[in-house]
Amino acid sequence: MLPTGPRRLRRSQLIAGLLTLSLAVAAFAATSWLATDRTSAQPVASPTEVVWQGSPPTATITLHADGPVLNWEFDVETQTPAGWQLGGFWVTRWIPGPAAHNQYTLLATVSSTDQRYQDSMSGVSEAHRVSGAQFQYAVWPFFNRVSDGREQAGVPVILTLTVPALPAVTRFGVEHVSGLRDSPHWWPQRLWWSKAHLPWGANRGFATASQYILYRRDQEYARVSGSSHNYSFEAYQDPYHPGDKCAGYKIRARYGLFYSDYVWAEEHRRYC
């Protein structure tokens, strides 16, 4: 029968050695943790601290003909709350006015690695895309708690954009021209204007008008290219309500997504 004494001794020595090693590792880990805690570790920020005590991105906004462009900077290393990681950014828009109901519209969720967004102005009426209109934007960083993945908004940066005065045409007139269908029912006419030019914004799409919109008695009548400077047509005249055959025309210039003020043709009428 093989002796059992030496086996018990070796097992006891092994257990004692492992116990000693475990205690040593635990002691080293505890010492390292205490040292780290004393130097750099921070308690996990609460959701309230994230939303009220964080720092917002640094942002700018510029107007382009095809939509406002937002650019921002956010230092992940220094601006992310302790115990959280940056999930991305929410971009929102608010249009001041009685119809806004004090609510922001969520435009996009942008990844944590992107720091630019261009607003396509989707859902914004033409009435709001004119000189003097105001838009308010907010860029919100949002975070996920490392321990459980909880999502929490951070402190936003707020930006306000006012659409500058976009030049209208300098002259706008209407004249009667002779034509084959010149009759009590049809009145051949020509609208003419001097094209609008902007002295700024060539790199933003505002160098020249992209389109001209013509109106007759407050109804849109035609749209012509920004390279045009006149428009000939035959207007139908109601013989029972003749009125002034050259009255009621106006024009405005379009620059991408935005519009100038109206100009009426009342001051320049010929042969009417």
Image (tube, rainbow, N blue to C red):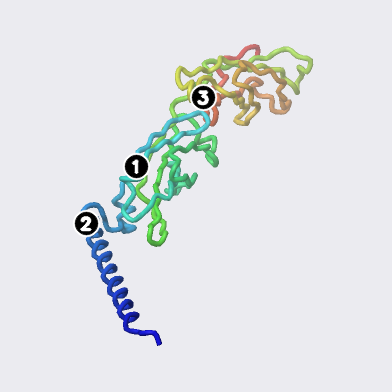
Labelled disc at residue 75? 1
- Seen from this angle, which residue lies furthest bottom? 1
Q: Is there any visible trace of residue 99 in the rendered image?
A: no
What residue is rendered at 52% in x and 35% in y? 127
Q: Is residue 58 left or right of residue 97?
A: left
Place of residue 75 in the rendered image (x, y in percent of width and height, measured from the top left): 34, 42
Q: Amino acid at mark 2?
A: Ala
Labelled disc at residue 35? 2
- Please report contact status of discs 3 and 1: CB closer than 8 Å, yes or no: no
Circle 2 packing at 10 Å, graded few (<14), some (14-19), many (20+), is: few
Labelled disc at residue 41? none
Q: Is residue 147 left or right of residue 215?
A: left
What residue is rendered at 73% in x and 12% in y? 178
Place of residue 20 in the rendered image (x, y in percent of width and height, measured from the top left): 26, 70
- Seen from this angle, which residue lies furthest front? 1
Place of residue 90 in the rendered image (x, y in percent of width and height, measured from the top left): 44, 47
What residue is rendered at 34% in x and 58% in y? 47
- Residue mark closest to the camera, 2 vs 1: 2
Q: Secondary structure at mark 1?
A: loop
The one nearer the camera, 33 or 233, is 33
